[in-house]
Structures are given as structure tokens and as C-alpha cells.
Image (cartoon, rainbow, N blue to C red):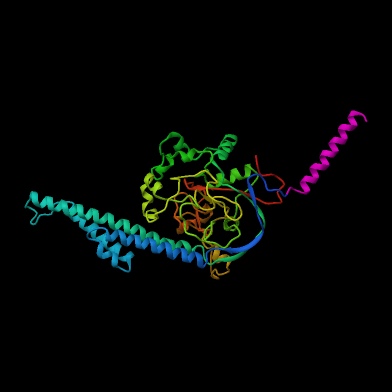
Amino acid sequence: MPPRMLVLLWGMLMVTNSTSAAEHPSTEPPQDMVLVPAGSFTFGAGPKERQLLNRVRKELLEGARAILRSADGTTDFAQAEDLTTVLATAIKQVADARSRESKPHPIPPAVSETAEETANRKQRLAQLVATSEVLSQAQAKVVLAEKMVSWLRAEEPGVVQQVEAFYMDKFAVTIGQYLEFCKATQHEMPFPYKSAVAGAASNKRFPEVADPSFMDPKCPITAVTQLEAKAYAAWVGKRLPTEIEWQYAARGGRDTVFPWGDEPWDGTQANLGGASLVKLNPKYSPSLSHLPKDDRFACLSPVGRFPPNGFGIYDMAGNASNWCDGNPWFMSYLLVKLAGELPKDFVEPRAKDPYFGGHTIEECQPLCGSGYLNTEFDARVTHRYGTLLMHGEPERGFRCVRNPTDGSTGTR
């Protein structure tokens, strides 16, 4: 057969094979992805999450009372039933007293304060400062306990949802993977990476970002905006999951509070906040100091260091929370809407919404999961919140999904 004819036959064979592959895409999971099977589940919180709330809230309030009992002048407050009101009143009274004692106040004004009076006043002022610090520490725990109640309301009522099968990344997108994306597309690496490379925190709010984990190529990329996460997903032929897809995958085929089960966090199931993080950033102390446990990592951990969930997906709790696609935006009232319980006169808040600090709802997108600085309560599967889509923080990362019908492998 002439060589030209062989070439034509080879070309026809390749076209036929290519068409066949497009019509019948491979059912093999793409590299580092897991097939999440179709099914139904309850999206949102239920009795188990309420039990978790009651347990953690009790721990926080007991911690607040223990702080009050540990110092002179505050032990009586520890017995109060309504700590919120009692502490608010006490803190104001102490603040007023500190203001009075901060400067001499002889009577009549013409009489100078004696050395002994000055020493006594300074001693009283020092005691007031110490009392104020104790009251503030206790109040921080009480405030957090009350905030948890409102947070859980955004996850109720639970609504049964049907989910089609999809592929999800087995691991969160890593710093190494995102660095390749930036080199190829001229995107910039986020500020925690730059701080870690420089060996100094560039953000006073998050001094821990100077930690080497923020430049470890095996750790999750964080502090990217939702738009940047979407850009990466498109670059690899994937997309961001919806909140419903993310929560369904996080449950791993089980009805449990956490991705690992119903057992309380003991430091072995996920990378959450603990004593080692508080050493790097003391501001986390009020929310984390009641936890006697700790994991092996102060900040980020390499992906896959903790056990996977029932679907074989890693880090669906802890390390880094995940951006999702609100399509079109984050709805704090999503569960109520799905349940068909919105008031008849409900009007979608398109103007500036107090929930988002005065920003419009179009500017906000959802995040699911928890990060290295979060508590056990935040590790619940139902944890969801909204924030500005252009706002990246050190505990916020992402992972991608794609549909089984997509012909591409979704990898580069």
C-alpha cells in the first residue's frame, strides 16, 4: 500500500478513536480526585449539632466561671446565672473606677495629694487593671458561647437534598500547585506566602503567617480570594463546589457531626487551633484556651496528614476552610429558603446587608469547613459562613470539583 494511503488511513483511525473517547468519557477518577456518588442527605444542622453546641457552650461558660474564681474581687461574679449582663455591668463599673483613679483627686482641689495617698491610689489602680483583665477574659468566653448559638441558627433547619455524582479533589489545592498556576498566569502569590518567605509577618492581625508552613509546597494555599480560587479551578478544567456538594462530600456517606465521626476532637483527627497557635498569636486565647488538647501543628499542616473521611477525602475539617460557589451569592437564609419557610413578604436583601458589615449581598460568597485557627465547634460538617469574595485570610483555602460527564481529566 502506498505510503500516502497509509497516512490517510492512520489519520482516519485517530479521528475515529478521538470521537469515540469524547462520546464515552473515561469513568476512571481523575488524578487525585474521588468520585462522590449520587445520593440524598440532610443539608444543615440537626439534633447532633445542637448537642455539640450545648457541650461546647457549657465548657466555655465553665471556663469563664473558673477565671472569675481564680482572682480576688471577681469570685462573687462566678455564681451569677446571667453572666452576660453581670460581666457587662462589672466591666463598665471597673472602667469608671479606673478613670477616677488614674489621676489625683484631692478634696478640696487646692490640697495636694500626699505621697502615701499617691501610693495607695496607684495600688488601687493596679488592682482595678488586674480585675479588668480577668473580667475581659471571662467575658470573651461568654460572648463566644452566645455567638455560637447564632452561628448554628444559620444552619437550621436541616433540609433533605438530592445530589448528583461528582468528582472532588482528594486534597485541598496546595501551595506548590498554586505556585505553578501563578507562574503560568502572572497571578500573585497571597500575603502569607510572601511573609513566610521573608521570615516576617506583613500583617499585624495575623503574626503567625511568618511561620514556615505558609511557604511549604505540601501545605494548602490560603488567603486567596474566591475570584482567584475560581481562576485556578478554570485553569485546571474544574470548578468550585456548591455548599450542598461540599457538605455532602464532607459527611462521607455518614450522618455524623464531624467528618471523622461523632467523637470529640482529641488532636488526632484534624488540624485545629490549640496552645501552640496561641503562642504565635495570643489573640486566639479566648476561643482556644478552654481546649486542653493540641495537634502537632501550630499553623498549616501538609495535606493528607490526618485520616480521610468515609469517601476518602482529606482535611474536610481543620487546616483550611474551603471557598464554595454561592451561585449567585452566599445566602444566610439558604436553609430557610430550601425548606420553603421564607415569609411571603420576604425580599432578598440586595442593598447593604448588616450581616456582611454593610456590604451588598452580591459581594459575598460562601465558605465551608474550618481552618488551623478554628475550634472543635467549627469543625462540624454543617459549618458555613459568608464573606467578601475579594477577602482572603490565612485560614481560607479551596479545593475543586468537576462533573463526571466532563471529557477533560481536570489535571495539568
7 inside magenta stretch: yes
How many labels, in total?
0
Q: In the image, residue 309 lies at what x, y percent?
A: 57, 54
Q: Please tell me which residue is depicted at 48% across the width and 66% down the height of the picture.
A: 50
138 inside magenta stretch: no
Residue 97 picture quarter: bottom left
**Does 344 appear above or below 165?**
below
Q: In the image, residue 99 lies at what x, y percent?
A: 21, 54
On screen, residue 130 versus residue 107, left or right, reads right
Depth check, front residue: 21 or 56: 56
Quadrant holding the C terminus: top right
- First to last magenta residue range: 1-26
Q: In the image, residue 52 lies at what x, y percent?
A: 46, 63
Residue at the left extreme of this rendering: 111
Res. 113 visible in picture: no
On screen, residue 143 versus residue 327, left or right, reads left
